[in-house]
């Protein structure tokens, strides 16, 4: 253990507890030992309730660095190094072959499934033991992954989280989660995507217009509409302009759209089967009538206007949240009355994934939009750029959550759904994971016990995966499951195996190699590209080429100088034309 | 959602405690911030406990050194950076200062002197008293003081011997909210606990057959330490023969065969001497911490009344000792094997 080379991925709650335990246990504490901890995140206030190696004065600093320093204070012999990289496909030049080959064991301290899956895939590829754990409130679980002995982490997946259908979120919400999902999406669209799109246009106007013209589809038209809204039709120069914009958004979202919806689908309308259209779970909406005397409306206007102003770098006056001053401006605004129209298409199909309804002549509309942009662009100051806003849930003073809560609650009011306070809104919209120190400590303690077994190279029956719930309390432990074994003829393999061909062979030689195993390789790919598929007659021309050359040419494969192999995925079938799942194949050169 | 608005917390509390408020709610957080905990003794497992409850945001934590024992904590605690081990300040003072850093909103103090010297109502200042490694008679004494002082003082004890751990809880009577489920609404539940003395007095031959052997082994160790004027933890493998004699005597007096407690288990307890295994301290500290938070917040069903951990079988086991007489003897252990 003292000589071990350990990688800890993540320096948050789990990471801090791990470092403390590992330092006390004397892991990586000899001159040969080394522990690398990596995390690209910085310390925030809400971390302090669990991540005890951090202090108030560390806020803003890199988690991995601070954690490593604190752990060294616990045990000066602890040979710990901190990196600030995310472990992902994008950092494979940092975490390269040499890096992985020099690691003995990997400990995950992550907070999301995707990162876990990626690290798991690297551990499978490089045949490294992985200790995995996670917490959710008072619950925690741990899993041991040992090459060839156990299944890997990715072998059993939870079913994906159910997401509400798009039309539910867009037109037919029936609970506050739908309203918050919608609010979050509008926030992003109005305050991040639109300004970003506008900036794309502003930095290269001719190219942008050309690409819009050439694609000429509904999506391009929508992008252009956003840009025109920002720079022409709804352009803001003063804070009063922003208030007007906010007022118009209120009218559009919570009055006009609702009026249109109930015009298209009156309360008593029926579906083609004769059932009431507005039957449960659908809720019949009612429009909101704006008044400057309603504090919740004022609060919505304030946060919307402030954020809009930010995107234009407009100075925010100190009376921006003053209800009286805002009411003065608002009372002077007169908006045209809304007339709902016939024949407006509203998507009701729950399976629809795209809500854009194409117009009859997109290109004409696009041309018109471009014209209006051309007319306006000379009015903008030179070098003008907008300021896109990225949603930050934890800064209470930035008005992000105020705006999202306002959007969601106004919508909830339309549909008669109970409203929520800012705290609960943040929980749902921010997708916050509840977390406490006790279950974190428990999880890491259990993992560290398994660590001893890994170093002792125990058989699979000695390891334990565990699940615990401190609120009950409940502890359940189980032996890890062995990996799924595939068989063909007298061969067997699992996800841990790779077939290694130690010569730089040609495509036809490769096919023969498979033939010798009683398998017909019908499709060969490298990275994202297909090198060979026997249904394409043209591919016969490739048979005499070296597979390596094909990979370099077709997949644009770039092989680091220290690596002397590359991997291909081969699809095979047996004599009875049944598909056989074969391992990854590595060809050495 | 909680009826108590988040505005009831200070801005600092709402920001730091955000993620845990999602678990137990604003009202529970407020109750924690008004709670006063006394911890007697300091060991590695108590260090873990203190870390957890300080991070959770209790109102105050008072540390006392009262029950002499042997421990390796002074050289191995993560609370104290290595270069400060030789400092002039007392060990507890160093611990307190570190704990304050974990959460400046918690009032952490060191109480000097022993319990004997304190006025009669000293314990009234606390909602929970936690006692670490100590002689059984000391623990029973503190437990009876808690009971004498009124029903509102909870008593918890914990000891970690090498990789083996034991937790004991006495809440006298405890009312808690049982969370609503499907067709069953929120309900108030009431638990009645026995004292440590009553628990220890339980006849071994009346306990369920599957009661974990660690319970008996710990009683044998306690008896050995007391009878031989040892400080708790002051044991080595050289004591094996003597400890086996203690086992013989106790088992006979309790009407049980010696095979009740395997040699191997006592061997492991003696081999551990005064050491506490860091991962097991983390596990026990997490469990004990959560139990304490449940007691203070009134939310969630607390453990009743013993908890044991042995990494050898990798299980966490809850035992109720003794069982109430009127209920049938069924498997009480909360461990489930898959």
Image (cartoon, coloured by chain):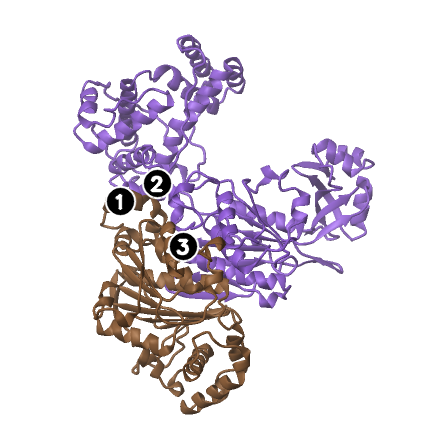
Along the line of sight, the residue nearer the viewer: A417 or A112? A112
Q: Residue A163 placed where, x, y %?
A: 42, 43
Q: From the viewer's perspective, is residue A353 above or below residue A127?
A: above
Q: Residue B236 placed where, x, y %?
A: 52, 77
Chain for numbered disc 3: A
Chain for numbered disc 2: A
- Asked if both marks, 1 and 2, belong to the same chain, the answer given is no
Residue, disc 1 = B10
Along the line of sight, the residue nearer the viewer: A304 or B127? B127
Q: How many residues crowd around disc 1 within 10 Å: few (fewer than 14), some, or many (20 or more)? A: few
Residue, disc 3 = A437
What is the display colour for chain A? purple
Q: Secondary structure at mark 3?
A: helix
Q: Is residue B172 visible?
A: no
- Asked if both marks, 2 and 3, belong to the same chain, the answer given is yes
Chain identity for the colour brown used in the image: B
Look at 69% across and 37% down and name the residue there: A530
Q: From the viewer's perspective, is residue A509 above or below residue B195?
A: above
Image mark for residue B68: none
In the image, is A124 to the left or to the right of B85?
A: right
Q: Residue B160 placed where, x, y %?
A: 45, 69
Q: CA distance from mark 2 to mark 3?
A: 31 Å
Residue, disc 2 = A178
- Asked if both marks, 1 and 3, belong to the same chain, the answer given is no
Q: Is residue A530 visible?
A: yes
In the image, is A258 to the left or to the right of A450?
A: left
Mark nearest the camera among 1 and 2 is: 1
């Amino acid at each position: 253990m003292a000589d071990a080379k350990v990688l800890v991925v993540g320096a948050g709650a789990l990471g801090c507890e791990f470092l403390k335990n590992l330092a006390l246990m004397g892991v990586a504490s000899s001159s040969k030992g080394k522990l690398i901890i990596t995390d690209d995140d910085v310390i925030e206030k809400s971390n302090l309730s669990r991540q005890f190696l951090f202090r108030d004065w560390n806020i803003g600093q890199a988690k991995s660095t601070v954690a490593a320093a604190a752990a060294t204070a616990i045990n000066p012999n602890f040979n710990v190094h901190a990196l600030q990289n995310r472990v992902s496909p994008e950092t494979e030049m940092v975490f390269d072959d040499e890096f992985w080959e020099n690691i003995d064991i990997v400990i995950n301290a992550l907070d999301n499934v995707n990162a876990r899956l990626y690290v798991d895939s690297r551990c499978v590829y490089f045949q490294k033991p992985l200790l995995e754990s996670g917490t959710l409130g008072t619950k925690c679980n741990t899993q041991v992954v040992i090459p060839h002995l156990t299944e890997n982490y990715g072998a059993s997946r939870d079913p994906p989280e159910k997401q509400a259908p798009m039309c539910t979120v867009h037109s037919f919400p029936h609970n506050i989660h739908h309203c918050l999902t919608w609010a979050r999406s509008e926030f992003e669209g109005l305050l991040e995507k639109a300004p970003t799109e506008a900036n794309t246009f502003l930095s290269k106007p001719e190219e942008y217009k050309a690409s819009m013209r050439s694609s000429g589809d509904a999506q391009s038209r929508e992008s252009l509409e956003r840009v025109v809204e920002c720079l022409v039709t709804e352009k803001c120069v003063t804070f009063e302009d922003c208030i007007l914009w906010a007022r118009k958004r209120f009218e559009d979202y919570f009055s006009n759209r609702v009026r249109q919806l109930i015009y298209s689908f009156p309360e008593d309308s029926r579906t083609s089967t004769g059932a009431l259209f507005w039957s449960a779970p659908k809720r019949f909406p009612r429009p909101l009538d704006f008044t400057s005397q309603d504090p919740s409306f004022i609060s919505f206007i304030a946060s919307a206007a402030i954020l809009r102003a930010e995107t234009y770098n407009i100075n925010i006056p100190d009376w921006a949240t003053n209800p009286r001053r805002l009411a003065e401006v608002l009372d002077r605004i007169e908006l045209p009355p809304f007339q709902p129209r016939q024949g407006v298409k509203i998507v009701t199909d729950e399976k629809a994934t795209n809500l854009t309804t194409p117009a009859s002549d997109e290109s004409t509309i696009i041309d018109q939009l471009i014209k209006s942009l051309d007319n306006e662009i000379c009015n903008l100051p030179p070098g003008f750029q907008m300021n896109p806003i990225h949603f930050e849930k934890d800064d209470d003073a930035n008005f992000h959550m105020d705006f999202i809560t306002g959007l969601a609650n106004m919508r909830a009011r339309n549909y008669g759904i109970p409203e929520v306070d800012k705290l609960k809104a943040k929980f749902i919209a921010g997708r916050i994971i509840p977390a406490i120190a006790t279950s974190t400590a428990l999880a890491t303690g259990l993992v560290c016990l398994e660590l001893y077994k890994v170093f002792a190279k125990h058989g699979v029956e000695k390891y334990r995966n565990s699940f615990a719930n401190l609120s009950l309390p409940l502890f359940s432990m189980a032996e890890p499951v062995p990996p799924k074994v595939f068989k063909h003829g007298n061969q067997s393999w699992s996800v841990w195996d790779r077939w290694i061909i130690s010569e730089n062979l040609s495509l036809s030689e490769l096919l023969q190699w498979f033939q010798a195993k009683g398998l017909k390789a019908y499709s060969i790919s490298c990275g994202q590209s297909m090198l060979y598929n026997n249904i394409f007659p043209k591919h016969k021309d490739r048979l005499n080429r070296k597979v390596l050359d094909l990979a370099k040419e077709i997949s644009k494969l770039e092989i680091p100088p220290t690596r002397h192999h590359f991997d291909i995925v081969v699809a095979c079938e047996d004599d009875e034309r049944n598909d056989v799942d074969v391992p990854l194949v590595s060809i050495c050169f | 959602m909680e009826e108590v608005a988040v505005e009831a917390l200070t801005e600092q509390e709402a920001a730091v405690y955000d993620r845990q408020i999602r678990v137990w709610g604003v009202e529970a957080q407020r109750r924690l911030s008004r709670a006063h905990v006394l911890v007697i003794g300091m060991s590695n497992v108590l260090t873990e406990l203190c870390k957890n409850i300080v991070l959770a945001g209790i109102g105050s934590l008072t540390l006392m050194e009262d029950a002499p024992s042997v421990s390796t904590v002074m050289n191995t605690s993560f609370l104290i950076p290595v270069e400060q081990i030789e400092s002039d300040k007392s060990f507890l003072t160093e611990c307190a200062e570190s704990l304050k850093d974990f959460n400046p909103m918690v009032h952490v103090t060191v109480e000097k002197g022993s319990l004997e010297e304190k006025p009669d109502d000293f314990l009234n200042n606390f909602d929970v008293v936690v006692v670490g490694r100590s002689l059984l008679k000391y623990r029973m004494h503190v437990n009876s003081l808690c009971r004498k002082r009124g029903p509102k003082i909870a008593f918890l004890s914990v000891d970690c011997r090498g990789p083996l751990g034991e937790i004991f809880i006495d809440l006298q009577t405890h009312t808690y909210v049982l969370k609503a489920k499907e067709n069953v609404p929120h309900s108030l539940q009431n638990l009645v606990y026995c004292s440590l003395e009553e628990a220890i007095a339980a006849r071994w031959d009346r306990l369920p057959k599957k009661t974990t052997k660690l319970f008996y082994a710990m009683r044998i160790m306690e008896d050995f330490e007391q009878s031989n004027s040892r400080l708790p933890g002051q044991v080595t493998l050289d004591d094996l023969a003597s400890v086996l004699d203690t086992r013989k005597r106790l088992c006979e007096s309790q009407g049980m065969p010696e095979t009740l407690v395997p040699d191997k288990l006592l061997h492991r307890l003696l081999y551990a001497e005064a050491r506490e295994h860091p991962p097991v301290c983390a596990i026990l500290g997490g469990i004990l911490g959560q139990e304490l938070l449940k007691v203070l917040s009134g939310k969630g069903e607390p453990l009743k009344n013993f908890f044991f951990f042995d990494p050898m079988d990798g299980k966490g086991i809850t035992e109720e000792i003794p069982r109430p007489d009127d209920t049938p003897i069924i498997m009480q252990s909360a461990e489930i094997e898959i």
